[in-house]
Image (cartoon, helix red, strand yellow):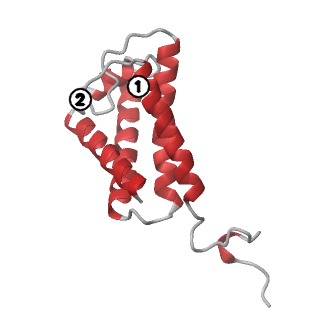
């Protein structure tokens, strides 16, 4: 529960920082060398939406074991990690990693890579703790609780 509250706070803060910096987010993301123009804007919208959804969910429902917000958190974490690792490996200079938009700016460095590794570790922990939805028992071979009638 504490991990969800911490991650909810961090991801909600990230999303809010990026929202108030939205005009700069496409250029911040373009510095990673993978996207530009409309694709960078679409990526910014995707990251912000994902961060808001999982961040608010974790804060509002810290005891929940639902998988959907955890998968969203994992997907956002993978996207940020992929951006950081490939840019760092290519030796690109990214003046602002963009995690909080223009707020709490930090350059891409090995410290950011450690932070990204931690988010992936947390995603793994959360995924292992999450349960399947209520409409399917984990050992049932039938989706949505459907099965042969008795």
Q: Residue 101: percent from the left, percent from the top?
A: 26, 31
Quadrant of the rendered structure where residue 139 is? bottom right
Q: Residue 147: percent from the left, percent from the top?
A: 75, 79
Name the secondary structure under disc 2.
loop
Q: Residue at x 29, y 28 (%)?
A: 25
Residue at numbered disc 2: 104
Does residue 47 lie above or below 52 as drawn? above
Name the secondary structure under disc 1.
helix
Q: Residue at x 46, y 47 (%)?
A: 73
Q: Residue at x 70, y 77 (%)?
A: 146
* Residue farthest to the front, as pictured: 2
Disc 2 crowd rating (10 Å Cα; few below 14, some 14-19, many 20+) is few
Q: Residue 148: percent from the left, percent from the top?
A: 79, 82
Label 2 to label 1, Cα distance in Å?
13 Å
Closest to the observer, 52 or 59: 59
Q: Residue at x 33, y 18 (%)?
A: 107
Disc 1 crowd rating (10 Å Cα; few below 14, some 14-19, many 20+) is some
The image's mark for residue 112 is: 1
Assess whether mark 1 and mark 2 are in contact (beta carbons under 8 angstroms). Answer: no
* Residue farthest to the bottom, as pictured: 150
Closest to the observer, 55 or 128: 128
Q: Residue 126: percent from the left, percent from the top?
A: 52, 53
The image's mark for residue 28 is: none
* Total labels drawn: 2
- In the rendered image, which quarter contains the C terminus? bottom right
- In the rendered image, which quarter contains the N terminus? bottom left
Residue 68 is left or right of residue 26, and the answer is right
Does residue 71 lie above or below 145 as drawn? above
């Amino acid at each position: 529960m504490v991990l969800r509250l911490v991650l909810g706070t961090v991801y909600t803060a990230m999303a809010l920082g990026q929202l108030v910096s939205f005009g700069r987010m496409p250029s911040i993301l373009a510095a990673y060398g993978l996207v530009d123009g409309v694709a960078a804007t679409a990526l910014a919208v995707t990251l912000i939406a994902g961060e808001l959804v999982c961040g608010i969910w974790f804060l509002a429902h810290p005891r929940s074991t639902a998988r959907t917000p955890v998968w969203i958190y994992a997907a956002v974490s993978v996207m940020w990690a992929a951006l950081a690792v490939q840019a760092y490996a290519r030796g690109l200079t990214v003046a602002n990693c963009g995690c909080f938009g223009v707020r709490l700016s930090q350059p891409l460095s090995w410290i950011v890579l450690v932070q990204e590794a931690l988010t992936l570790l947390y995603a793994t922990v959360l995924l292992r703790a999450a349960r399947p939805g209520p409409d399917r028992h984990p050992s049932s071979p039938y989706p949505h609780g459907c099965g042969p009638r008795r």
